Image (spheres, rainbow, N blue to C red):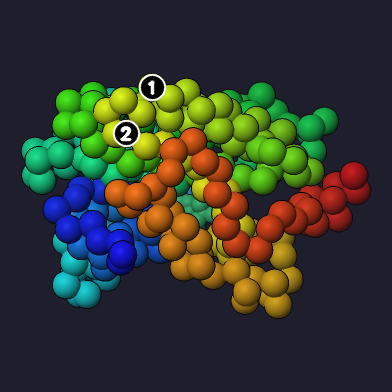
Amino acid sequence: MAIRFDGRVAIVTGAGNGLGRAHALGLAALGAKVVVNDFGGARDGTGGSMTAAETVVEEIRKAGGTAMADGADVSNYEQVQAMVAKATKEWGSVDLLVANAGILRDKSFGKMELSDFQKVIDVHLAGTFYCCKAVWDGMKERGYGRIVLTTSSSGMFGNFGQANYGAAKAGIVGLMNVLAQEGRKTDIRVNTVSPTAATRMTEELLPPQALALMKPEAITPAVLFLLSDNAPTRTTLGAGAGSFAQIKIIETEGI
Ligand code: ADP
């Protein structure tokens, strides 16, 4: 049976670029109303404007879909709550959440500052927790929810230079394991996707030949499946081209 999301409201965080953008476009094409969240900052989590999210909303509208832009910083719980309140006021509920916003601050462990650790934990792990927390009560009340969290092979196997990111991504699997159990009774299904795709996060690390095979759109079908009525629960779905070493870090820092 073909997957559709008519009548469903989705939030996709970090949807101004890369994977989140592809997921937002995919959801809208299948009928969901989509909150395109992105605080629009630089890759290391500094700065910010909503332009990227607004551009994706325009793309969705041009294709006949329904979307709104949101500039919440996922590491700020008040802003996340305001985003969920805005979507609920406008469209009545939040049924689907894709927690995808992310940053990188790669450094070999010896050179990693405490602030590099804290910032990555704040955006990935705390930000994912906050987004789940903000949609949870509404999903429980309505007896329906689909949540997809973004993890990484880095969280399972480790990549050079990613002590901060790997710890956050492993933590996200831990969060999924609990929420999947606590949500089961009320049909809230929680899964993680572990993507490998060509995005701003990976473009500096891999050769062009590899990147050409790794379009973000290739990951979206896995996410749409995990958001569907027939989704499993408590699954980590690997999608994309598989793990890779942090070539740049190894070369530049001589690990
Ligand atoms: P990927 O697609 O691999 O996740 P990108 O860097 O292309 O990598 O996309 C991540 C997106 O997440 C970016 O558009 C970025 O602006 C967004 N983002 C990063 N930090 C936050 C945050 N704290 N709140 C909301 N969006 C964020």
Q: Quadrant of the C terminus?
A: top right
Give percent across and percent down for residue 97: 33, 42
- Looking at the image, which residue is at 76% across and 52% down? 246
Q: Residue furthest front?
A: 1
Q: Residue furthest right?
A: 254
Q: Is residue 150 left or right of residue 69?
A: right
Q: How many marks?
A: 2
Q: Is residue 65 left or right of residue 59?
A: left
The reply to whether dot 1 and dot 2 touch (C-beta < 8 Å) is yes
Q: Quadrant of the N terminus?
A: bottom left
Q: State how far apart marks 1 and 2 are (Cα).
A: 8 Å
Give percent across and percent down for residue 173: 56, 33
Residue 15 numbered tag: none
Q: Quadrant of residue 188?
A: top left
Q: Is residue 29 visible?
A: yes
Secondary-structure class at tag 2: strand
- The amino acid type, in three-letter code, at marker 2 is Ile
Give percent across and percent down for residue 241: 66, 63
Vertical placement of residue 91 versus 170, above or below = below
- Looking at the image, which residue is at 43% across and 44% down? 232
Which residue is disc 1 drawn over? 182
Dot 1 or dot 2, earlier in sequence = 1
Q: Is residue 135 left or right of residue 110?
A: left
Which residue is disc 2 drawn over? 188
